[in-house]
Amino acid sequence: MSRRVVRQSKFRHVFGQAAKADQAYEDIRVSKVTWDSSFCAVNPKFLAIIVEAGGGGAFIVLPLAKTGRVDKNYPLVTGHTAPVLDIDWCPHNDNVIASASDDTTIMVWQIPDYTPMRNITEPILTLEGHSKRVGILSWHPTARNVLLSAGGDNVIIIWNVGTGEVLLSLDNIHPDVIHSVCWNSNGRLLATTCKDKTLRIIDPRKGQVVAERFAAHEGMRPMRAVFTRQGHIFTTGFTRMSQRELGLWDPNNFEEPVALQEMDTSNGVLLPFYDPDSSIVYLCGKGDSSIRYFEITEEPPFVHYLNTFSSKEPQRGMGFMPKRGLDVSKCEIARFYKLHERKCEPIIMTVPRKSDLFQDDLYPDTPGPEPALEADEWLSGQDAEPVLISLRDGYMPPKHRELRVTKRNILDVRPPPGPRRSQSASDAPLSGRGRLPRGTPAGEPTRERA
C-alpha cells in the first residue's frame, strides 16, 4: 500500500483524533448481539446506540451534548420483544428513527427534543411484513417517508412510513441471506450483496436486476457494497484465502474490476462509510482498532490509500455523522462514534489548514434535511437529486417536526366522520395495533384501500 509518487490531493494529510475523555459517552452497555450492523446511528441532534436489555430489545438515544457518564436509569427506547439488530435516523426529520429487530418487526419512533422521564415504549408505527428477523434498514435519500428493510426471509420491502403501507416487495431476487443494501445518491437504484456471493444492481420500481456480478470477492465471508459519487460500486469482502479485500466496480462493465486490492488477514467484516462530498471511503472493521481511509478518484489506481487512524481498543460498532453535523470552523470532514464495550467515543477527521475562514473546497453544498420528492411521486417513476444546502454559516437543525401517519386501512379505529371536529385523538381507543396514529386529525374519514 506504499505510495510511490506524491499525488496532489487536498485530503492527503487528513488525520484522525479521538475526542477528549470528557467528550465521550460513558457507562453504556453496548449490545453483544452477533450481527454485522454498526449498532450506532447519529445525526446533528442525537446519538442512538443499540444496548443490552433484558426481556426484549432496546436502544438508547442521547442528545449529542449529553456527554460524560450516562445515568444507569436513563430512559431507553423499548418496544421490541427480541434484540434490536439495526437502527437508522430519517435523513429528512432528525427526530424520527427506525429500528429493526429479531422479532420480525420494524418500529418507527418519534424522539422528543426534551429528555423523557421514562422509557419510550410506544412507536408511532409498527411495520409487519417480514416472516423472519429484520437486520437491515435504510431510508430513501430523497423521497419523504420511504424506508427500506431487508430480512432473514431474503425479502426487501420498501414502505411508505407516512401511511404504514408496503410500496414494493422484492421477494424473488435473493436466494439467500442479504448482507447489505445501499441506495444510490438519488434513490433510483439499489446495490445489494448476498450470501450467494453475488453483487446485484436492482431497479426496485421495476423489480428487476439491472446488472450483477458473481463472486466480486471469492471468499465466503460477507460482502459490503456502497455506491460512489461517479456511479461506481465500492465493495469490501474476502479472498478465497480469507484475506480482506476491497474492490471498485463499474456496473456498466462488471466483467473486470476497476480496482482490486488485498488488505490483511483479519476476519472482521469491513464496514465501508462513504462520503460523496470528498469521495473518501472509511473502512471500519468489526473488532479492529483502526479506521483506514482511501480516496476514490478518476485516475489510476482509482482507490488511493490515505492513512490509518489507530487506537488501542477494538470497535464494537461505528456511527457516521452526516456532513451537516460537522464543525466546519475546524475543517472537520468526518466524525465517527466508536463503540467500546461500555462507552462511545467520538473520533474526528480533520484536514489541517492554517486559515480560520470557511473552506469552500472542503465543503461543497451537501444534502440537507428537505426531501426532494413525496413517496407516491417516487413510486410513480419520478427521480430527483437531493436538495442541497450550504454549510458556510454552519448548520442549525430545524425545530422538532411531528411525523404524521395517515393510515389508509379499514382496521383503523377512528371516531365517526362528522362535524364534531372538537373530538380529540386522545378519545380514540388505544388498544391494539390499530389505534389512531398520533397526529392524525380526528374525524377524518377512513379511506379503504382499493
Image (cartoon, rainbow, N blue to C red):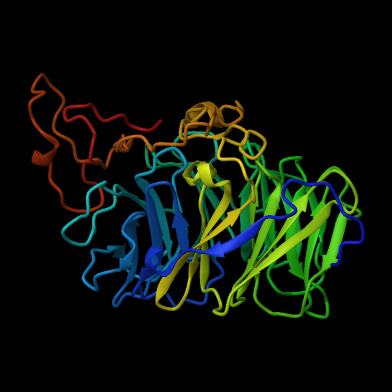
Q: Is residue 446 above or below residue 39?
A: above
All told, the count of numbered labels is: 0
Which residue is at 26% across, 30% downward?
Answer: 446
Residue 153 visible in the displayed image: no
Residue extending farthest to the front is 354
Q: Is residue 30 left or right of residue 417?
A: right
Which residue is at 69% across, 56% downward?
Answer: 225
Which residue is at 54% across, 79% downward?
Answer: 313
The image quadrant that residue 52 belongs to is: bottom left
Residue 188 spot, x, y in % from top left: 64, 36
Residue extending farthest to the top is 419
Query: Closest to the observer: 274 or 19?
Result: 19
Residue 297 visible in the displayed image: yes
Q: Is residue 90 above or below residue 32?
A: above
Q: Is residue 172 left or right of residue 145?
A: right
The image quadrant that residue 420 belongs to is: top left
Residue 406 spot, x, y in % from top left: 31, 34
